[in-house]
């Protein structure tokens, strides 16, 4: 009963927390996992196949240890519980705690009773639906929205960034909504057409508010489910193997792009993607400085190089950019961030974790079609966020993603019981 109310409560809070940018997902998932602790079934963690638990543990041990040689590292935590200002100063520790809580919340769903499953699913569908409708209204009335929140939020920087984070979170969880709608319309013969129109509307809406990461998320969220339909027996393994391969190859790919793509093409990109291009080019230079163990978790925050300071580098950028850091706290590419901060060791451990996750997952054909489509869409959207949006140590994003994964479990368990 406790777990049922908690999971339903988590999804009831999804929309308001996402609406303000998702920062509240961290305390939400930690509190929920702590309350579920007495009834949590963690046996599957210890029984994980093919050394998955060991690989994940090794990655986190190395990542946390790397903070010791990261520039400007200090105490692991600050404050005290008694004074109420206790916090973990090292971001990698916060993300590790979020990951543990996400695992706990996931396994707390295993024995949820049928009425609780249905209640949580209904609340989840309403929360995601309301979030989607709200985002579409914001896109249509974007100028009015900025004016509405101007008294409490900076309409130039703060509000647009919050809305973009909201859009990114929605793209991550929206595949659940789309999969259910597609499943209900499939028999009518119009399911595919309606889904395509909805995806185009979303992409146009997100592009209108400069949420290019969300647009890429929509595209990949549409493509990956088709891949799983094409490969029903080995789809997940192929997908995660490919994901691991891209991480290992990312520095080489970025290097080749830098050599083959004319700078005039780069200037034609949207400013957000042009800045990412130069951020990635500087990051591979940083990787070359410390290729084996990296500069340490969070090191990219200490990089102070600005446009115009490196001879012959990014000479075509607009003049106002000369005072801006090339890497604004992180490279906006988690694969490059792994290489730069954790080196070859971290990249190999991350790739091993992904390969083992692909092997541990059930085959696509062994889960319901709706869940397969939703899982594929969520993987595609998350890949977009992984490669062009967030820092690897963004605990708020990973907390939101952890909650979104519980939605897949709810979808599968309710389909099985139907």
Image (cartoon, rainbow, N blue to C red):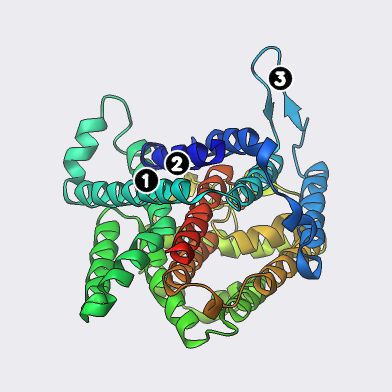
- Image mark for residue 123: 1
* Mark 2, other Cα within 10 Å: few <14 / some 14–19 / many ≥20: many
* Mark 3, other Cα within 10 Å: few <14 / some 14–19 / many ≥20: few
Near-viewer residue (398 or 348): 398
- Residue sticking out furthest to the bottom: 230
Sequence-earlier tag: 2 or 1:
2
Q: CA distance from mark 2 to mark 1?
A: 6 Å
Q: How many marks?
A: 3
Kind of element beneath mark 1: helix
Is residue 12 toward the left or the right of residue 333 in the image? Answer: left
Q: CA distance from mark 1 to mark 3?
A: 37 Å
Is residue 163 toward the left or the right of residue 405 in the image? Answer: left
* Quarter assignment of residue 48: bottom right
Contact (CB < 8 A) between labels 1 and 3?
no
* Mark 1, other Cα within 10 Å: few <14 / some 14–19 / many ≥20: some
* Quarter assignment of residue 44: bottom right
Sequence-earlier tag: 2 or 3:
2
Can you identify the residue that label 3 sits on? 79
Can you say whether 225 is above or below 126 in the image? below
Kind of element beneath mark 3: loop
Indicate which label's residue lies in the foreground, 2 or 3.
Answer: 2
Residue at image location 36% in from the left, 41% down from the top: 15
Residue at image location 65% in from the left, 50% down from the top: 103
Near-viewer residue (50 or 140): 50
**Spot occupied by residue 223 in the image (x, y as percentages of width and height):** 42, 77
Can you identify the residue that label 2 sits on? 8
Can you say whether 77 is above or below 401 in the image? above
Sequence-earlier tag: 1 or 3:
3
**Spot occupied by residue 21 in the image (x, y as percentages of width and height):** 42, 40
């Amino acid at each position: 009963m406790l777990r049922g109310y908690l999971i339903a409560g988590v999804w009831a809070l999804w929309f308001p927390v996402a609406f303000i940018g998702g920062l509240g997902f961290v305390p939400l998932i930690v509190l929920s996992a702590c309350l579920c602790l007495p009834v949590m079934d963690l046996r599957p963690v210890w029984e994980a196949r093919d050394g998955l638990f060991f690989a994940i543990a090794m990655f986190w041990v190395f990542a946390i240890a790397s903070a010791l040689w990261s520039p400007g590292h200090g105490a692991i935590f600050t404050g005290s519980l008694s004074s109420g200002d206790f916090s973990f100063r090292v971001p990698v520790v916060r993300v590790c705690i979020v990951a543990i809580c996400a695992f706990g919340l996931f396994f707390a769903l295993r024995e949820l009773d049928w009425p609780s499953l249905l209640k949580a699913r209904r609340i989840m569908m309403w929360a995601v639906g309301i979030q989607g409708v709200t985002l579409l209204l914001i896109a249509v009335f974007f100028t009015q929205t900025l004016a509405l929140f101007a008294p409490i939020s900076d309409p130039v920087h703060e509000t647009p960034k919050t809305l973009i984070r909201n859009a990114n979170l929605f793209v991550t969880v929206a595949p659940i909504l789309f999969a259910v709608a597609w499943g209900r319309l499939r028999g009518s013969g119009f399911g595919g057409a309606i889904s395509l129109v909805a995806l185009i509307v979303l992409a146009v809406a997100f592009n209108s508010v400069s949420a290019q990461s969300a647009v890429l998320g929509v595209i990949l969220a549409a493509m990956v489910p088709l891949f799983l339909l094409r490969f029903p027996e080995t789809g997940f393994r192929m997908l995660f193997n490919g994901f691991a391969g891209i991480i290992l190859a990312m520095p080489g790919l970025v290097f080749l792009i830098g050599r083959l793509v004319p700078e005039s093409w780069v200037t034609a990109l949207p400013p957000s993607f042009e800045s990412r291009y130069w951020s990635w080019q500087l990051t591979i230079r940083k990787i070359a400085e410390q290729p084996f163990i990296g500069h340490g978790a969070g090191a990219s925050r200490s990089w102070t190089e600005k446009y115009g300071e490196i001879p012959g580098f990014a000479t075509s950028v607009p003049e106002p950019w000369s005072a801006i850091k090339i890497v604004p706290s992180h490279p906006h590419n988690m694969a490059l961030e792994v290489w730069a901060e954790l080196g070859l060791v971290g990249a190999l451990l991350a790739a091993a974790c992904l390969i083992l996750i692909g092997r541990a997952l059930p085959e696509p054909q062994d889960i319901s079609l709706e869940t397969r489509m939703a899982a594929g869409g969520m993987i595609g959207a998350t890949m977009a966020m992984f490669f062009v949006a967030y820092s690897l140590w963004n605990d708020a994003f990973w907390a939101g993603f952890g909650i979104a994964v519980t939605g897949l479990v709810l979808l599968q368990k309710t389909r099985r019981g139907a």
